[in-house]
Image: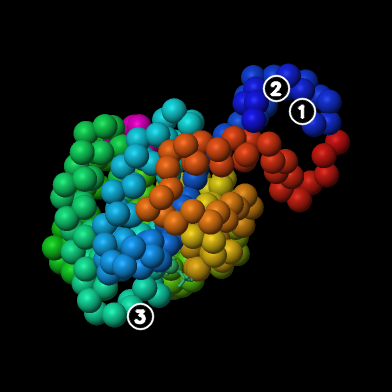
Amino acid sequence: MAEQTDTAPDGSALGQGAHQGPRHVAIIMDGNGRWAQSRGRPRLFGHHAGAKRVREIVECCPSLGIKYLTIFAFSTENWKRTQVEVAGLMSLFRRYISKEMKALAAKNVRVRFIGDRVRLDAKLIQLMDQLETETAQNDGTHLTIALNYGGRDEVARATKRLAQDVAAGKLSPDDVDEETLPKYLDTHVLPDPDLVIRTSGEARISNFLLWQSAYAEYEFIDTLWPDFTAEELGRLCRQYGTRDRRFGAVKT
Ligand code: IPE
Ligand code: IPE
Ligand code: MG
C-alpha cells in the first residue's frame, strides 16, 4: 500500500499531515494464554512472552508519532483467574518493573500507572512508585500501564472523590460536568486515546478506558499479543490515518 498519496479518496489535495497518525494509542494486550496453550506450554509462559513484546512496541512509538501509549496489563476482573496465574503475573510485574522498565526509563520514557493500587502487594506498589518518580522528568513517550484497572471501578472511585469534594464544600454540584469529572479519573493528565487496539480476535473492550474511549477509533485484530510487532502497529497507525473522525459533526 502506498504510504503517501497526493489526493484523498474524495479528490481533495492532501497537505502534509493530512493523514495524521494517532497521538495516543491504547492497547488491550490479549491472547497470551492461547499463544502458550497452542505451544503446549503453561499460560504463564505466554505472559512472559507477552511482557517481552512491550519493549519493541514502546521503542517504535517515536518513529510512528505516538506520544502516549497506554497498555492494559491486568484488569479488575483478572483476579478471577487461578491463584497460580495471578501470583505468577504479580511476580512478573515486579520483575518486569525492576529490570525491563528501567531500561526503558533510560530511553526517556515517562512511566505512569493507572488502576486501583489497594489490592496490590506492598513491594509491587513500591516499585511502581519508584519507577514513576524516576521517570517523572522524562519527556519522550508517555507510557501508561493499566494494572488492576477497570473502567467502571475508575469512574466509581472518581465519583467518590468528587462527592467528597462536594461534601467538603470544595465543589458545587452545579459545576459537575464533562470537564470536571475526568479531572478525578486516573487518566486526568492524559489526552483521550485516538486509537484502541485489541489483539487476539475478541471484539470487546473488557472494561478498558470506558469514559476516555467515547470517540476512539477501534482495531480488533487476530494476532495474539506475543506475536504483535512494531510493523503491525505501523500498519494500524497508517490505517487510522485514512479514517474520517467526525465526532458527531457533518463534513462540509
Ligand atoms: C492477556 O492474555 C493478558 C492478561 C489478561 C493478563 P490472556 O491471559 O487473557 O490470554 P487469553 O485471552 O487467555 O489467550
Ligand atoms: C482484558 O483481557 C484484560 C487485559 C488484557 C489485561 P481479558 O482476557 O481479561 O478479557 P476477557 O476476559 O476476554 O473479556
Ligand atoms: Mg484474554
Q: Is residue 30 left or right of residue 54?
A: right
Q: CA distance from mark 1 to mark 2?
A: 7 Å
Residue corresponding to mark 1: 8
Dividing the picture into quarters, in which one does residue 15 lie?
Answer: top right
The amino acid on which the numbered mark 2 sits, given as a three-letter code, is: Thr
**Camera-nearest residue between 97 and 238:** 238
Of helix, strand and loop, which one carries label 3? helix
Q: Secondary structure at mark 1?
A: loop
Give the answer, above or below, for where 175 lies relative to 3. below
> Would you say 235 lies left or right of 11 here?
left
Could you tell me residue 83's position as x and y percent? Answer: 24, 79
Q: Which residue is mark 2?
A: 5
Check disc 3 and give the amino acid type: Lys
Residue in the foreground of this view, choosing between 26 and 83 = 83
Q: Quadrant of the C terminus?
A: top right
- Which span is picked out in magenta? 138-142
Mark 3 or 1, nearer chain start: 1
Quickly name the residue at label 3: 80
